[in-house]
């Protein structure tokens, strides 16, 4: 059952990302090819699947348009991976066994590809097919989860700083809760909000 849910979720998200992302032939081609290189590099789609399944738990079925929210979350996750891999940060040449974005397209295009995925994600979030107040709450939740205060960017900063010293248990927990956990939490929470869940249901 779990494997089936994961496989179905991956298929839904891959089709939606294919539809939402600019064509690799859309000018300027290089940036769109770089975006797609990283988005379709073989991710598990865990965050979007958690978002969709949280919405299903609240609504009893997948609400119309939930796959767009879920895909925006995957774009944000991918943007963070592109930037994490850059020489100025983790300096990784491989991601999921494939050359990283900056290795294939150069650092400048990789930086811009990450920026572009983040920008497009918020464009998608602004058009979500849910009540306006839910849409605003979803955007707020995701922006906080990807930001500097207990969010993804803050976790990345502490991770970079920890490379120059031996981190204690509190610092390690902060890094994992912020760099990884915050967007996973936001995926579940925003799926519940999209489906019209009450505060108690979302909690």
Image: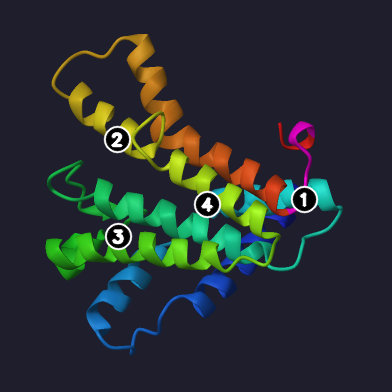
Residue position for label 1: 196
- Marks 3 and 4, how far apart at CA: 18 Å
Residue 116 position within the rendered picture, expressed as x and y whole percent measured from the top left: 32, 66
Tell me, yes or no, whether the two marked residues, 3 and 2, touch with CB atoms within 8 Å: no
Q: Nearer the viewer's eye, disc 3 or disc 4?
A: 4
The first of marks 2 and 4 along the sequence is 4
Mark 2 lies on residue: 156
Q: Nearer the viewer, residue 195 or 67?
A: 195
Of callouts 3 and 2, which one flags the residue occurring earlier in the amino acid sequence? 3
Graded by Cα atoms within 10 Å as few (under 14), some (14 to 19) or many (20 or more), the crowding at tag 1 reads some
Residue 85 at x, y percent in the picture = 24, 49
Q: Nearer the viewer, mark 2 or mark 4?
A: 4
N-term mark: 1 or 4: 4
Mark 3, residue position: 114
Q: Which residues are magenta?
A: 195-200
Q: Please, which residue is most extreme toward the right here? A: 60
Q: Secondary structure at mark 4?
A: helix
The residue wearing badge 4 is 139
Q: Earlier in the sequence, mark 3 or mark 4?
A: 3
Q: Please tell me how crowded label 4 is: few (under 14), some (14-19), or many (20+) other residues with Cα within 10 Å.
A: some
């Amino acid at each position: 059952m779990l494997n089936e849910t994961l496989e179905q979720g991956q298929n839904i998200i891959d089709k939606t990302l294919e539809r939402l992302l600019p064509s690799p032939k859309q000018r300027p081609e290089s940036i769109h090819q770089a975006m797609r290189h990283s988005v379709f590099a073989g991710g598990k789609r865990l965050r979007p699947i958690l978002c969709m399944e949280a919405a299903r738990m609240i609504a009893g079925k997948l609400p119309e348009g939930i796959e767009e929210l879920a895909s925006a979350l995957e774009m944000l996750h991918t943007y963070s991976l592109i930037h994490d891999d850059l020489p100025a940060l983790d300096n990784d040449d491989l991601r999921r066994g494939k050359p990283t974005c900056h290795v294939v397209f150069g650092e400048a295009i990789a930086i811009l590809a990450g920026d572009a995925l983040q920008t497009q994600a918020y464009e998608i979030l602004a058009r979500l097919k849910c009540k306006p107040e839910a849409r605003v709450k979803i955007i707020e939740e995701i922006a906080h989860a990807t930001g500097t205060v207990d969010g993804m960017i803050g976790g990345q900063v502490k991770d970079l700083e920890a490379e120059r010293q031996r981190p204690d248990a509190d610092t390690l927990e902060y890094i994992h809760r912020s760099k990884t956990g915050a967007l996973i939490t936001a995926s579940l929470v925003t799926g519940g909000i999209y489906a019209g869940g009450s505060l108690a249901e979302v909690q």
